[in-house]
Image: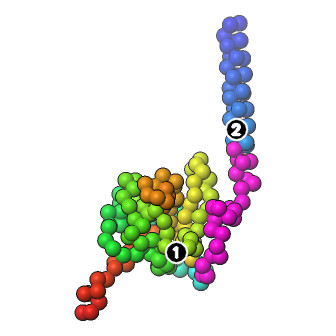
Amino acid sequence: MKGFSMILVYISMTKSILSFMFVLTVGLGSCQTGVKTNINPINNPKKAMETSYNKTDEEWKKELTPEQYRVLRQKGTESPHSSELNDNFEEGTYVCAGCGTELFTSKQKFDGHCGWPSFDNEIGPGDRVKKIKDFSHGMVRTEIVCAKCGGHLGHIFDDGPTQTGQRYCVNGLSLGFKKLEKKDEQKK
């Protein structure tokens, strides 16, 4: 009889735990369903850049490497410390690998010690990088995408070491780099 009552207690506890998990899952999910991703502080309130980048997946696949396609078009993430741009501190401009839009300058770059190129701001008045609430992988983050072509860049965090307090954590595969030409080189 003792064994039977232990089984009943076990079943009762299991039901309670499963009920709690269900309520928690539904509760958290309902918090996210009402979120509007076009709220001004998160998504750029300025007019988005004009774009002619209505490309098909096949067109993107022809223009990008498979790894770039996975990151830029499928919101993938490259392995940390895998991009040579992470350790690049030459003077120049970082551009979107999908459309060539200038996004960041070398003056905005810092070593974030995270394994990905890190910047404390973007070029211009805030119309080049679009910010979107991201609830993927059980986290709440802010995704950053190129405002012109919609390519996934990475995420922005409020733990940067500079005055802005921001760290744009960007996949190196999402970027290209245009080295600043010195005046002596321009005359040649």
- Residue located 60% across and 56% down the image: 134
Residue 23 visible in this rendered orientation of the protein: yes
Question: Is the C terminus in the top left, top right, bottom left or bottom right quadrant?
Answer: bottom left
Q: Which SS type dominates the magenta stretch? A: loop
- Residue located 68% across and 26% down the image: 14
Which of the two discs, 2 and 1, sits closer to the camera? 1
Q: Is residue 34 left or right of residue 66?
A: right
Mark 1 falls on what kind of element?
Answer: loop
Q: Position of residue 100 (x, y in %)?
A: 47, 79
> Within the image, what quadrant is residue 1 found in?
top right
Residue of label 2: 24
Q: Earlier in the sequence, mark 2 or mark 1?
A: 2
Viewer-side residue, 123 vs 43: 123
Taking 77 as reference, is 182 above or below it? below
**Does the stretch in magenta take in 68?**
no
- Report how far apart the C-alphas of labels 2 and 1 lie in the structure: 42 Å
Q: Residues within 10 Å of mark 2 (few under 14, many from 20)?
A: few
Residue of label 1: 124
Residue 115, disc: none
Q: Most extreme residue toward the bottom, as rendered?
A: 188
What's the residue type where badge 2 is placed?
A: Leu
Q: Position of residue 169 (x, y in %)?
A: 46, 59
